[in-house]
Amino acid sequence: MRAGLSGAGYVKHEAWVLPENRSLLKQMEKQLRQPILAGSFMTENFMSAGNNWNIDRLYSALQALDEVVANDITLSLVQGSESSIKLEMNDFGGLPIYIAVVGEQIIVDTVLVDVESINDVAAFNDAVLRSREMFPLSSIGIESMPNGQVVYNMFGALSSDSSLTNVVTEVKTLVDNVQRASEAFERFFI
């Protein structure tokens, strides 16, 4: 592994930390293997090393996002059998994105289209199954809603111990992918 990292241009650097900070250093090491955007490096204060998100902590962390503070995203906590977070993407017509923390996973989900709004379901299904490379980090499924409505949904999943940055990236990627899917599959919509 060392030879591979060295061959990829990484340099070895020794660091001395307190024993309780080992996992934090490991996380920071992984971050530092990525290009630093806009010349800045940020650590996230919303999670300590080794903790998984729960819905309340994730909701609190999302409230601090610049996009939420600026009202580009409206955030609400949805209570139900399993609580979720609803993000209304105001710059995208109020597109609703839902986030749920389910065990070891965070699910980011939105409705793509109602099945009844498809003019040729078989052809649409075929197009969807052939589209997996078009929508990075997202999948398309079919789901029955509590009211009985059957919809195609677009979703992504990540580990519940993911960084806040990765959760936000998943949300933004889903929004982009929904727009791209709407354009790509427009011919199937009634």
Image (cartoon, helix red, strand yellow):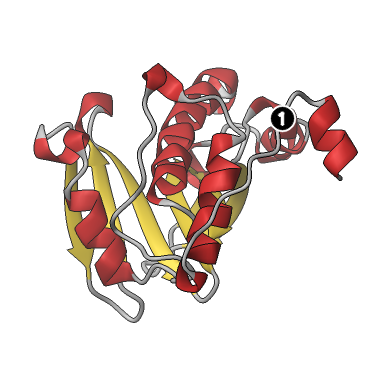
Horizontal relation, residue 43 to residue 27: left or right: left
Q: Is residue 58 above or below residue 188?
A: below
Horizontal relation, residue 36 to residue 63: left or right: right
Q: Residue at x 20, y 34 (%)?
A: 67
Q: Is residue 9 above or below residue 31?
A: above
- Closer-to-camera residue (118/25): 25
Horizontal relation, residue 176 to residue 46: left or right: right
Q: Quadrant of the N terminus?
A: top right
Among the 4 quarters of the image, the one containing residue 69? top left
Residue 147 percent location from the top left of the image: 36, 67
Residue type indicated by callout 1: Tyr
Q: Mark 1 points at which residue?
A: 10
Residue 28 percent location from the top left of the image: 51, 47
Horizontal relation, residue 8 to residue 59: left or right: right
Residue 5 percent location from the top left of the image: 80, 35
Would you say residue 176 is visible in this rendering? yes
Residue 168 percent location from the top left of the image: 39, 42
